[in-house]
Amino acid sequence: MYWNKRLTQGNTYMAKRIEALAVVLCAALLIPVSGYGWTCRTHMYIAKQAGMKNPEYACIPDASRHDNYRLLLPFHYHNAAPDAVVDSAYIDRYAVIEALYVPKTEPGGRPIKIMVPHEAGVLYWKIIELYRKLKTTEARADYDYAVMCMAHFIGDLAQPLHNYPHGAEPAGDGKVYREIGRWASSVHDAFDGRFDAVENPVMKIKAITIASEEDLRREVAMLANESIALAKRCYNDDPLKRRRMTDAEVTARIEDAVSLLRAVLADCRRTFMK
C-alpha cells in the first residue's frame, strides 16, 4: 500500500514537471530559434491531428536534448546516403550500443559503461525501441514519456533533411557528401518552418494499421524512403537553385506523420491504475 502511494505520487510529480516544461517551451514559440527540426508548431500540429492528449508535449524532446547535446541529438535524425534504401535490417544497423568510456581527465581510470548512438543517427531504431516500451511498460510515467517521444520522432521522420546527408558528417555508408551536406545545412531552417507557411492545410489521413513491430518497421522504412526521395528531388530537380518543398509536398509529409502516429497510438493505447 505504501509503495503504491509512493508510485502514484512519483507519477503525479513527473506529470507536473513535464506539464511545466511544456508551458515554458510553448511560450518559447515567440522566440525565433534555429534548432534543426520542425518548429514546435509543426510538432504540436502533428500530435494534435493524431489525437495526442497533450500535443504540446511533442515539443519537449527538442528542449531536453540540450542536457547532453552530442549524445541526444542523433535520436532526431539519420544521415542516410542519397541512394540508401531503408528496410528492417537497415533500421537495426544504426542503433545505440553499450560502450566503455574513460574520461580524458582520468587516464587509466575505471571505465564507465555508457550508451552511445551510431554517429550517422539512430532515428529509425529509436522509434522501434519506443514502440517496445509502449507495449510492455507497466509504469504510467514511462508510458507517457514514450508517447511524448514517439510523437516527436515520428514527426522528425517525415522531415526530409532528417533523412539525408548533413554538413560534413558521415552518412550511413560512412562517406561524407560535402556538396549535398552544405546544401542541406544551408536550407535546413527553411525546411523546418515550411509547413508553418501553408495556409489552411487539408489533411488526407491514410488508413494505417499497426498491430506488431513488423508492421511498424515496414511503415517506418516506407516513410524514411519517401523522405529521402523528396530530399533528393529538391536537390536534383534544379541544379542551379536547389529548390525547396512545395506546399503539396510538405503537406504530404505531415499527412504521413499524422497517419503513422495515429496508428501507433491506437495500437499502443493502455489503461493504467490511478
Image: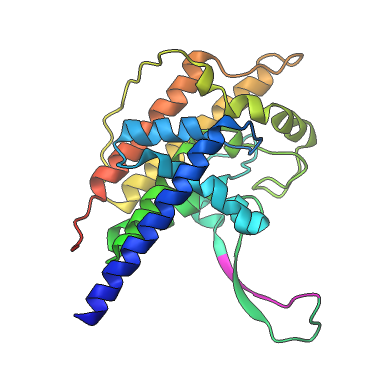
Residue 93 percent coordinates (x, y): 55, 56
Q: Main secondary structure of the magenta part?
A: strand
Count how many numbered circles sit on residues in the image: 0
Q: Nearer the viewer, residue 119 or 233?
A: 119
From this view, report whether residue 216 is shown above or below residue 247.
below
From this view, report whether residue 78 is shown above or below residue 8.
above
Q: Is residue 38 visible?
A: no
Q: Quadrant of residue 164?
A: top right
| Magenta span contains residue 101 | yes
Find the magenta span and give its range.
Answer: 97-104
Q: Is residue 94 visible?
A: yes
Residue 274 percent coordinates (x, y): 19, 62
Question: Seen in the image, is 108 located left or right of residue 244?
Answer: right
Residue 41 percent coordinates (x, y): 48, 30
| Magenta span contains residue 184 | no
Q: Which residue is found at the position 46% from the left and 37% from the top? A: 155
Residue 206 percent coordinates (x, y): 30, 27
Question: Seen in the image, is 179 located left or right of residue 269?
Answer: right
From this view, report whether residue 110 is shown above or below residue 23.
below
Q: Nearer the viewer, residue 19 or 215?
A: 19
Q: Nearer the viewer, residue 120 or 18?
A: 18
From this view, report whether residue 190 is shown above or below residue 119.
above
Q: Which residue is found at the position 49% from the left and 47% from the top? A: 60
- Quadrant placement of the N terminus: bottom left
